[in-house]
Image (tube, rainbow, N blue to C red):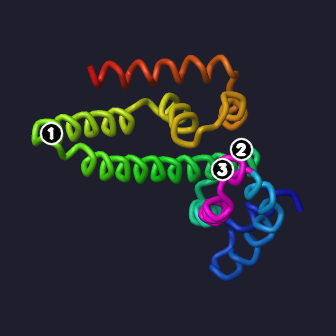
Amino acid sequence: MFDKELITKIQSLDSHAAKAREFDKLIVKYTNRIQQLTISYLKDKQDAEEAAQDTFIKAYKYLDNFRNDSKFYTWLHRIAINTCNRMLENRARQRVDTVDTVDEVAAAATPESTLVEEELSAILTDTIENLPPKYKDVFTLRCVDELSYADIAQQLNIPVGTVRSRLSRAKTMLNTAIS
């Protein structure tokens, strides 16, 4: 049975149990591909498994919104990428919090230096959070996850030159905010 026919069938079912049984067929079909995607994106097996599981949960939850005008895997892939991006943002936020804590302890020499560090950290964190998504994704993948330009280009499906220009633009935005 093709994906479109199976999805149409699932969407027409009234029973939650019947929908879940049919949706399991899609899970079986796409689990390996989604797990490979999340592992390549997150570089951590445990996080990748969690992201894959969250992807299927979200897909099941919102399957009635799927219009069947594109391939199911394309839709599922986008959910997986969005899930991974959220996890990467959470990682970055946790690292910034950890760095802030270490910096506060180390820079506790004077009240003035502590205040300056806190202000700079707040500005930097806020600026990173408010970067446009296309710059934030590249910045996070490069500076937090330390991926190569080629890996970033592959994951975001953009040319390496675009990765370089977006990273440069993100750094310029951050420098402007700090200045």
Disc 2 + disc 1, Cβ < 8 Å: no
Disc 2 + disc 3, Cβ < 8 Å: yes
- The amino acid type of the residue labelled 2 equals Asp
- The amino acid type of the residue labelled 1 equals Leu
Q: Gap between marks 1 and 3, in whole Å?
A: 52 Å
Residue 65, image quadrant: bottom right
Judging by the rendered image, the residue that carries numbered circle 1 is 115
Q: Position of residue 83 (x, y in %)?
A: 57, 53
Judging by the rendered image, the residue that carries numbered circle 3 is 67
Q: Nearer the viewer, residue 40 or 10?
A: 40
Q: Quick one: SS at disc 3? A: loop
- Is residue 49 a member of the stretch shown in magenta? yes
Name the residue rendered at 57%, 60% in the picture. Answer: 62
Q: Give whichever of discs 1 and 3 has the lower sequence position.
A: 3
Q: Gap between marks 2 and 1, in whole Å?
A: 54 Å
Range of the magenta residues?
Answer: 37-54
Judging by the rendered image, the residue that carries numbered circle 2 is 69
